[in-house]
Amino acid sequence: MRYHPRRQHARAVSTFEIFESLRSTSEVRVRTNVQTTSLVIAVATALAVQTAGTQTARPAIASGPDLKATLDRAANALGMIRGPQRIDALSTVEYWGTGFTYAIGQSFRPDMPWPAFKATYHAGIGYQVPGMRVDITRSNPDGPVQGGGGLPLASAQRQIQVVSGQFAWNESEPGAGLVPGAGTATPAPAAVNERLLQLWTTPYGVIKAAMKAGANAKVSVERGATIITFPAVGTLVKTTLNAKNLVERVEVGSDNPVLGDIVTETTYAGYQDLTEAKSDVLFPAHIVQKQGGFPVLDVTITKTDTNNPYVIFPIPDNVEKAAVTPPRAATVDARKMAEGVWYLTGGTHHSVAVEFTDHVVLVECPQNDARALAVIDTVKRTIPRKPIKYVVNTHHHFDHSGGLRACAAEGATIITQGLSKPYYERVWALPHTLSPDRLAMAPRKAAIEAVADKRVLSDSTRTLEVYRLEGSRHADTMLVVYLPKEKVLVEADAYPPAAPNPLGAPVVEAVNLYDNIRRLKLDVQQIAPIHGRWVTINDLRAAIGRPSTN
């Protein structure tokens, strides 16, 4: 392990010109259950002009509140300003709490809130590095469990996420990876910006970032509230102060493969001195963060500690080495299951391509545009000169529906369960300006076909049957695909087979899958899971404790 003082003190806030389009678009709204505000439009405009090469800051606006005075009042209200020199003396903070985290895009039904986990929460931040460690232990909520995201958990699950400068990683325990045998540090380079943004949108973080932004920050008054906007980590941050000059709300625009331009809104309430020493440094006792209109975090803070010199973020060697390795492009491997049936693997989410006389049916186009385009390209190379006519979507969860827009842009008809169709029609109409995908760049009306309980696709070569999976607690929109000639079943999330070894106790969803196979009288011999490995029906039987001859 090595320390890099220069790297840890590198700039964490990238700056670009702030444009007056924010106020001119402040009345734009998309009225759906998905929160989409003017902020994302302003972000798109600012980023577009930044990309075009605009670097020179515009002259400050003469009228309106004074930025420095506004930030000084906010810092003073929080207790950050100390000493006769009246300087910002707060360099680190830790806070502890309990509440709930939520799995975005994993609801039981479309339009339902994201499923909840009970959680204990501990975060440590060093603003000079900048670095942040978030340590969450999740457990099942009280009452019936419905939805995805890993629910129900077999036992409490600990997640530790770290960022330090331009490095990000996940830890099996605090400080993992620094010495042999002290846990595992897993590099997470794609998470750097998201985690830095989380750091700079904490109450102390927004004040520090706005001060660092200098002339690129702006203060205004909207409907009687003081608004501070500034650039951080390549995007625009909008902060609202309350009447006591305390940070009340922070909004940041981002892209979601399903929802498009979304706002992450974090609200802070109940400020008080939660330090044991009663140091007159205030912190919110209640933090709520929303994405897509529903909470993703809701915690009550019970304790804080400021300026602890031992809040540090040394970078494990393997994390540093991984950061210099360029990210791999999405890869897809095509494995032949039967004549004209291909299992498309190569990532965490698989697909199945089925060849008909003059077209292809694709089962699942998951995750995002990058994965979807790689899958589509593989289908075209594996089954040339036959278009993808239909794409069967197993269920509405975002990791299984994030690539559907790319398939719609190809002209394929999306076959999905009836509850998902109106949801897709609504959310796909939302703007994708922050990170335009294939459908946004080449707009066309998506063709979506709803399945109630059964749909059959057939021609002279083969038959493909689509069934609704009854009784699922994972998703009420779940579909499975059966190929009667090949005796192959394609399923998602009900039975993700582990590596070949003895399995633990039967999983409820796997038992339900087997019960549905028997109910529908399907002669299944092979299973192609969207997650995991290609298995046989006897593997499923063994996993749930059923006789292999049954």
Image: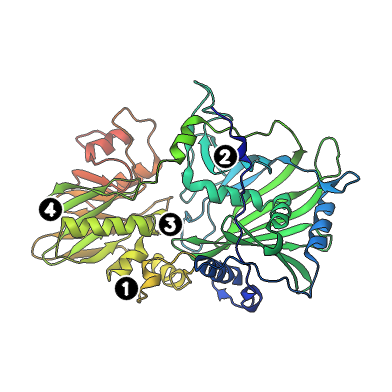
Crowd class of label 1 (few under 14; some 14 to 19; many from 20; radius 10 Å)? some
Disc 3 target residue: 398
Residue at horizontal 25 percent and vertical 46 percent from the top: 528
Specify whether residue 227 is in view: yes
Quote the CA–CA distance across marks 3 and 4. 31 Å
Residue at horizontal 10 percent and vertical 51 percent from the top: 339
- Tell me which label, 4 or 2, sits earlier in the chain: 2
Q: What amino acid is found at the position of numbered circle 3 in the picture?
A: Phe
Q: What amino acid is found at the position of numbered circle 4 in the picture?
A: Lys
Specify whether residue 133 is in view: no
Camera-nearest label, 4 or 2: 2
Camera-nearest label, 3 or 4: 3
The reply, left or right, for residue 258 in relation to residue 549 is right
The foreground one among 36 and 458 is 36
Classify residue 454 by image quadrant: bottom left
Number of the label disc, if any, that sits on residue 447: 1
Where in the figure is residue 493, as x and y percent of width and height?
Answer: 37, 47
Number of the label disc, if any, that sits on residue 96: none
Where in the figure is residue 452, as x and y percent of width and height?
Answer: 33, 65
